[in-house]
Image: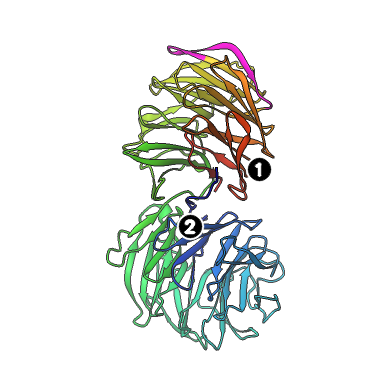
Amino acid sequence: MPYEIKKVFASLPQVERGVSKILGGDPKGNNFLYTNGKCVVIRNADNPAIADIYTEHAHQVVVAKYAPSGFYIASGDVSGKLRIWDTTQKEHLLKYEYQPFAGKIKDLAWTEDSKRIAVVGEGREKFGAVFLWDSGSSVGEITGHNKVINSVDIKQTRPYRLATGSDDNCAAFFEGPPFKFKFTLSDHTRFVNCVRFSPDGNRFATASADGQIFIYDGKTGEKVCALGGGKAHDGGIYAISWSPDSSQLLSASGDKTAKIWDVGANSVVNTFNMGSNVLDQQLGCLWQKDHLLTISLSGYINYLDKNNPDKPLRVIKGHSKSIQCLTVHKNGGKSYIYSGSNDGHINYWDSDTGENDGFSGKGHTNQVSRMAVDEMDQLVTCSMDDTVRYTNLSKRDYSGQDAVKMDVQPKCLAVGPGGYTVVLCIGQIVLMKDKKKCFAINDLGYEPEAVAVHPGGGTVAVGGTDGNVRLYSIQGTSLKSDEKSLEAKGPVTDLAYSHDGAFLAVCDANKVVTVFSVTDGYAEHNVFYGHHAKIVCIAWSPDNEHFASGGMDMMVYVWTVGDPETRVKIPDAHRLHHNIGLPRSWSMLSARN
């Protein structure tokens, strides 16, 4: 069985309130890129479902930008490491790695010949550096600031000029190469968040937390005007981006609007009202060919519509926090993937196109720990907010009355026929029927960790941290112990019945999967070894002859029930993070990204 990656459903940008988020664009205008955790995400601007992920940083990445040649991307992380890597190969081979200073890299810029790079941020001794891309040799000094530098840009025409913006409320202007400090621009009264030269090099703009945008001459650094005469926005401005023809400027602000400015006429062309919620604050923007992109505090990426400023052309949604659980379900002839993350957000994805959205209304407020779809086509989820929720998958909106409060925090659940749900809480097993609690077992004498209900109903298997699987029977509205336990090879992390109910697969913290034969009175059928670290999830294929396991070794194995030696090993299924979800009827894997 060969395997290949069919699709990557990318994460959203990782955003932080009050901090600008940089969107990079490729010189041809086809792709844009951003960062989340230790990953750089490259997406196609026309079809954002086409995505590629770079995962080689050891620390959280802050900024990534294409070289003007289009052949390389430079990305900088919180430790001060700058990696320059290839964009033409699928493997993204590392070309060079530098440490310009010790501390977070906040922005970077290339010269138009792709030979020099300027890097700025939160260094300890210095806040910036500018050097040759292939040797690391210095080509000037970035001085003139006494606080963190937030932004840098280099004029893309000769003679080269460089501008920076800092938390000391100033911008600075440099000539070069070698780049030398010329003078400070002290027009702003708050942090300078962004500086950008126009593509033709004639102007550069600075944007600040004081809500002002100033335009300067690109060659001399002389002030030309303040956009809007005074304040350009009612809130702090986090990002600006020039149009390809250098005549207009896009700005993104904490006042929940984005604006297009005609720089020559010093007037607003469009104001885009992005909403009234705090999550509608605009933290980043990019003008890429005909696409106008902004990033909201929610992490959503908005495609602005010049002809209809109040409604974006499209909004890219997804997860910006780590995914904790998954399931798959067919709805209206289409196959959907449901995913829950550690901020309580649940998303559903069309498995063919990658089109996705969240449920409407107010849902979970904390990590979603487990999910399953019951026979009534309801998504049943449990969360660290101490609730179990039932969400109708045809309506796809949360309703208040379908949240059931638990006495203790739930951590796992399983659904069975007849409207039954079995919920594992800390030190407790709860049986629910038709969305109501009907029975609980409290004094267990062990800590339950994973649960599965036999497809035929009636039997419940509960795996404990003591390495045993105990069997219970559902009798009406109560749960009775069968006084039968199965021995796993270590603390149980997950278990699942095959779809025909013939086998029970149990995975454990000792890197072993044990399969029991239900028809033979739960006799041990086979034992499967291969993972190098704790196994955390397991799922059966529809044919009942194969199952998959995912572990903290970033591996996924596909096993054959009858022959432990026949297996498919999928290494690095997710770089950086272990796999945490294999849907109950598998076709896909997920990671903490």
Quarter holding residue 183: bottom right
Task: Determine crowd level at label 1: few under 14, some 14-19, many 20+ residues with C-alpha closer than 10 A.
Answer: many
Give how far across and how far down residue 232 sits, in percent. 40, 71
Q: Marks 1 and 2, Cα distance to the nearest angstrom?
A: 24 Å
Whether residue 494 appears in magenta in the rendering, the answer is no
User: Range of the magenta residues?
Assistant: 473-490
Q: Give amino acid for label 2.
A: Ala
Foreground residue among 66 and 519 = 519
Residue in the image at 51% along x and 21% along y? 502
Do the CB atoms of the residues marked 1 and 2 lie less than 8 Å apart?
no
Q: Which residue is mark 2?
A: 51
- For the question of whether residue 43 can be seen, the reply is yes
Check the image and report above or below for 354 versus 175.
Answer: above
Whether residue 488 appears in magenta in the rendering, the answer is yes
Q: Give amino acid for label 1.
A: Asp
Foreground residue among 509 and 89 = 89
Check the image and report above or below for 402 versus 589.
Answer: above
Q: Secondary structure at mark 1?
A: loop
Check the image and report above or below for 353 versus 292.
Answer: above
Give how far across and how far down residue 212 sits, in percent. 44, 72
Is residue 562 toward the left or the right of residue 228 in the image?
right
Residue in the image at 50% along x and 43% along y? 343
The label on residue 230 is none
Quarter holding residue 312: bottom left
Give how far across and how far down residue 507 sits, in percent. 62, 30
Q: Which residue is mark 1?
A: 553
Task: Determine crowd level at label 2: few under 14, some 14-19, many 20+ residues with C-alpha closer than 10 A.
Answer: some
> Which quarter of the rendering shows the N terminus?
top right
Q: Which badge, 1 or 2, comes first in the chain's sequence?
A: 2
